[in-house]
């Protein structure tokens, strides 16, 4: 059945990106369109959206939102395969340097920003004469949409047939704010209760999505189970257990129009399984860029990551002395906590030619680092899906990961006996287990034939979005029947 789908996200690649959410929001819609659905996407209009290099036109539609005296307006652009992308403009709320706030923080008026956006989305579809069968909401910024639909918009005939899917991309970000901010959402005080928006005395946008959406999903099967435990449930495990009958895990895909070493315009040499030797040029480029001093047999490792506790950076910090003793080079591209940034800055200063750090968000450099490295480190404490390890597979860069969430689902442990597997995994988040996995990888690296087999296994892995889109399509149909 051909469905009318609206996907709502605070970031959509290439218009705005801070992490994997943008990659998913930019890549899933074209894959859904290929399946015949009428899919449209909507996001806020930030200053960075103009840098996507796509035409953006004003639709000359004003958006006024009940309960807010604010007005926005609607713009239109396109994603790949001519998927319509709508942008909600509001100068006061979204014309800012950052998408969410200074790194690691949310702007103090986040409640106003995203409750306005959520209602503007509902008003926008009416103005566009688009009656969605499904509104696919993503992460806490869109968590109030299911709440509005079941409260302020409950009797609105426009949405009488509309169902919602709320996707969790990271349960660690919940959009929790003081109770006093509830007024700014236009929602009734009666919703401030345990079976509503109340979460430990605060209001929680994420909880709103978890309670009020018709169906829930997250971005890997393993994570869908982990979030039902106290260890990784961030206090939401009880709600998720209660709703486990409508909670699904769908592993993200790889957008091969962007992440493919055969065609990637951002890397110095294109290569594929049949032209692996070209990858060496990418390695040479990286060595030059970062003035690394290493010989041909020294493996080049990389990390491309937010520098946060979630990503297991503390395991790397604790492994520093051991890593210093190994014959390896390490390039880190990342931004995040000032403490971790200072650590990596100092480390690369102390070990020039061995450790290199780029403390910035640089999409193009990310591609070059992935193509030029031999291994990727992802020792995450938790990982809803993780995309970088799946990109690494495509680029013949072998991932060494913690066996958690999407990392567990997407990487298979390599065995040099059977020649099967795509990377190396360790279970317990302790430095000694991480180092053991790394040692295993290093010894394989020095067996040229074995390493090539391992690289080719990863490159052959089909993680295309087509597969995930079919699963979402089935889930949407299921939601409609719910
Ligand atoms: P998360 O969404 O938790 O940050 P993912 O692995 O799912 O982690 O996605 C991260 C995305 O952001 C990937 O596309 C990765 O390449 C990219 N990325 C992360 N940090 C940087 C950076 N400093 N510069 C460029 N790209 C980055």
Image (cartoon, helix red, strand yellow):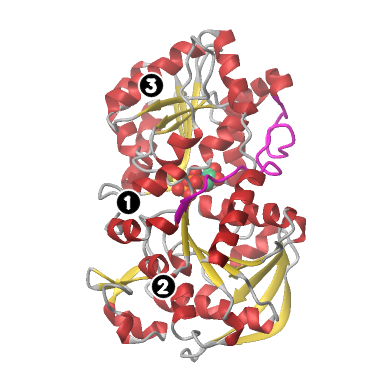
Label 3 and label 1: CA atoms lie apart by 28 Å
Q: Is the residue 438 above or below the residue 127 in the image?
A: above
Whether the residue carrying mark 1 lies under 8 Å from ligand 1 is answered with no
Regarding mark 1 in the picture, which secondary structure is present there? loop
| Residue position for label 2 | 110
Q: Nearer the viewer, mark 1 or mark 2?
A: 1
Label 1 and label 2: CA atoms lie apart by 27 Å
> Magenta residues: mostly which secondary structure?
loop
- In terms of image quadrants, where is residue 261? top right
- Residue drawn at x 73%, y 39% is 265
The disc placed on residue 228 is 1
Regarding mark 3 in the picture, which secondary structure is present there? helix
Regarding mark 2 in the picture, which secondary structure is present there? helix
First in sequence: mark 3 or mark 1? 1
The disc placed on residue 437 is 3
First in sequence: mark 2 or mark 3? 2
- Visible residue check, residue 359: no
270 in the magenta segment: yes
Q: Is the residue 4 above or below the residue 402 in the image?
A: below
Residue 295 drawn at (x, y percent): 53, 13
Magenta residues, start to end: 247-272
Q: Is the residue 27 above or below the residue 188 in the image?
A: above
Label 2 and label 3: CA atoms lie apart by 41 Å
- Residue drawn at x 49%, y 11% is 416
Q: Is the residue 35 above or below the residue 431 in the image?
A: below
Dot 3, how many residues are within 10 Å of its Cα: few (below 14), some (14-19), or many (20+)?
A: many
Residue 93 drawn at (x, y percent): 50, 77
Please say if the residues under marks 2 and 3 sit with CB atoms less than 8 Å apart.
no
The disc placed on residue 63 is none
**Left or right: where 280 falls relative to 414:** right
226 in the magenta segment: no
- Residue drawn at x 36%, y 67% is 207
């Amino acid at each position: 059945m051909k469905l009318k789908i609206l996907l709502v996200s605070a970031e959509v690649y290439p218009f705005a990106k801070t992490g994997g959410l943008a990659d998913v929001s930019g890549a899933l819609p074209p894959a859904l369109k290929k399946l015949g659905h009428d899919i449209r996407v909507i996001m806020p209009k930030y200053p960075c959206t103009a840098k996507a290099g796509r035409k953006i036109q004003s639709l000359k539609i004003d958006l006024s939102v009940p309960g807010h005296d604010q007005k926005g307006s609607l713009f239109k652009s396109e994603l790949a395969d001519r998927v319509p992308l709508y942008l909600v403009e509001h100068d006061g709320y979204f014309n800012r340097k950052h998408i969410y706030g200074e790194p690691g923080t949310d702007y103090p008026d986040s409640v106003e920003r995203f409750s306005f956006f959520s209602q503007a989305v509902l008003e926008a579809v009416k103005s566009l004469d688009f009656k969605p069968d499904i509104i696919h909401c993503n992460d806490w910024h869109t968590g109030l949409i299911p709440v509005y639909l079941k409260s302020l918009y409950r009797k609105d005939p426009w949405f009488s047939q509309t169902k919602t899917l709320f996707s969790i991309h990271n349960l660690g970000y919940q959009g929790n704010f003081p109770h006093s901010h509830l007024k700014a959402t236009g929602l009734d005080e009666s919703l401030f209760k345990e079976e509503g928006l109340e979460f430990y005395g605060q209001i929680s946008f994420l909880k709103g999505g978890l309670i009020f959406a018709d169906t829930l999903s997250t971005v890997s099967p393993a994570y869908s189970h982990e979030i039902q435990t106290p260890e990784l449930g961030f206090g939401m495990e009880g709600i998720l257990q209660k709703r486990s009958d409508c909670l699904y895990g769908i592993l993200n895909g790889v957008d091969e129009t962007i992440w493919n070493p055969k065609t990637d315009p951002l890397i110095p040499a294109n290569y594929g399984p049949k032209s692996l030797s070209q990858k060496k040029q990418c390695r040479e480029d990286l060595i030059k860029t970062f003035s690394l001093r290493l010989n041909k047999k020294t493996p080049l490792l990389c990390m491309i990551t937010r520098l946060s506790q979630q990503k297991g950076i503390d395991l790397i910090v604790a492994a520093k002395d051991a890593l210093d003793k190994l014959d390896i080079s390490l390039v880190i591209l990342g931004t995040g906590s000032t403490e971790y940034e200072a650590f990596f800055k100092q480390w690369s200063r102390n070990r020039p030619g061995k450790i290199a750090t780029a403390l910035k968000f640089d999409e193009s450099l990310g591609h070059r680092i992935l193509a030029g490295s031999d291994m990727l480190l992802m020792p995450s404490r938790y990982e809803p899906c993780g995309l970088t390890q799946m990109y690494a597979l495509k680029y013949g860069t072998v991932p060494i990961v913690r066996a958690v969430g999407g990392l567990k689902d997407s990487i298979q442990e390599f065995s040099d006996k059977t020649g099967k597997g795509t990377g190396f995994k360790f279970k317990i988040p302790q430095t000694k287990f991480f180092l053991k996995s790394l040692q295993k990888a290093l010894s394989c690296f020095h067996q040229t034939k074995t390493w090539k087999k391992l690289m080719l296994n990863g490159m052959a892995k089909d993680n295309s979005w087509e597969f995930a889109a079919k699963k979402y399509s089935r889930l949407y149909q299921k939601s409609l029947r719910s």
